[in-house]
Amino acid sequence: MFTGIVEEIGVVAELNPQDSTGGTSLTISLPSTSQLLTDCHLGDSIAVNGVCLTVTTFTPSPPSFTVGIAPETLRLTDLGALTTSSRVNLERAVRADTRMGGHFVQGHVDTVCTILKMTPDGNAVTIRFAPKNKEVLRYVVYKGFIALDGTSLTVTKVNDEEGWWEVMLIAYTQEKVVIAGKKVGDTVNVEVDMTAKYVEKSLTGYLAGLGKEGGEGGGLGLLEKMVESIVEKKLASAGSSSS
């Protein structure tokens, strides 16, 4: 589990598509002053551009670490497109005493999105994104949380019909995360707020249960009746007030 508050920006030293295990590994170099690995152990989780990955080797000085990347991760994220010297957001997994400055981020990327537009607004910048998988838009709401390359951000605008959303980066954030250094056409890893998924599943189960009790029309039929009842009461109340 992560918070979406980036701790460090690392640099890709190597992306090896055929390492000694027969898989793909990614080695990240850190600034000489970095404290990211001071309490690191093999098997620890570190989010790299929002992707939860497992440390397989690390070197305290000069600081660097290697993580393995599964085929499924390569399919769902843009990590496979990283090159030597690419900059990446880094965050260690949270501890029990961690201040929750962002939101609950799992490091399980849902899809990638493309930067459509970057618009300066004073010393801030508004960035518009379009997801590869349009289905994630149902979890993106105005003023809701979203993790972009592992950065916890607030949605400032969303357009379901056109298939995009926007966030705004203040000057401080622009200096601390990699998104500000990207350009139109570049990709970003996306993780929607997991709370929305749990709410959707719970509501689906609840309506399914109502459907078994409600017979024809199922849960949606009962829901429609509930809404109709509420509307009728409101109209009746309004009619009484006007008379």
Image (cartoon, rainbow, N blue to C red):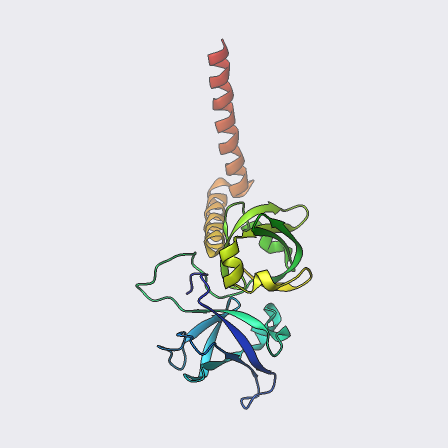
**Residue 12 placed where, x, y %?**
56, 77
The residue at the far front in this view is 123
Q: Please tell me which residue is depicted at 51% across the width and 46% down the height of the picture.
A: 143
Residue at (50, 58) in percent of width and height: 173
Residue 219 lies left or right of residue 83; in this view the side is: left
Where on the picture, by quarter, is residue 129? bottom right
User: Does residue 192 appear in the picture of this structure?
Assistant: no
> Splitting the image into 4 quarters, where does residue 93 fall?
bottom left
Looking at the image, is 146 positioned above or below residue 41?
A: above
Q: Which of the two residues, 171 or 164, is positioned nearer the viewer here?
A: 171
| Residue 138 in view, yes or no | yes
Given residues 169 and 164, the one toward you in this image is 169
Disc count in the image? Answer: 0
Q: Is residue 15 found left or right of 90 in the rendered image? A: right
- Which x, y percent locates residue 19? 57, 88
User: Which sits in the foreground, 54 or 3?
Assistant: 3
Q: Residue at the bottom extreme? A: 20
- Residue extending farthest left: 97
Work out whether residue 78 or residue 233 is closer to the camera in this orientation and state it. Answer: 78
- The N terminus appears in which quarter of the rendering? bottom left
Q: Position of residue 213 (x, y in %)?
A: 46, 42
Residue at the spot x=54%, y=70% of the render? 88
Residue 205 in the image: above or below residue 15: above
Q: Can you give x and y, in whole percent of width and height, for residue 130 in the image?
A: 65, 55
Image: 109 above or below 241: below
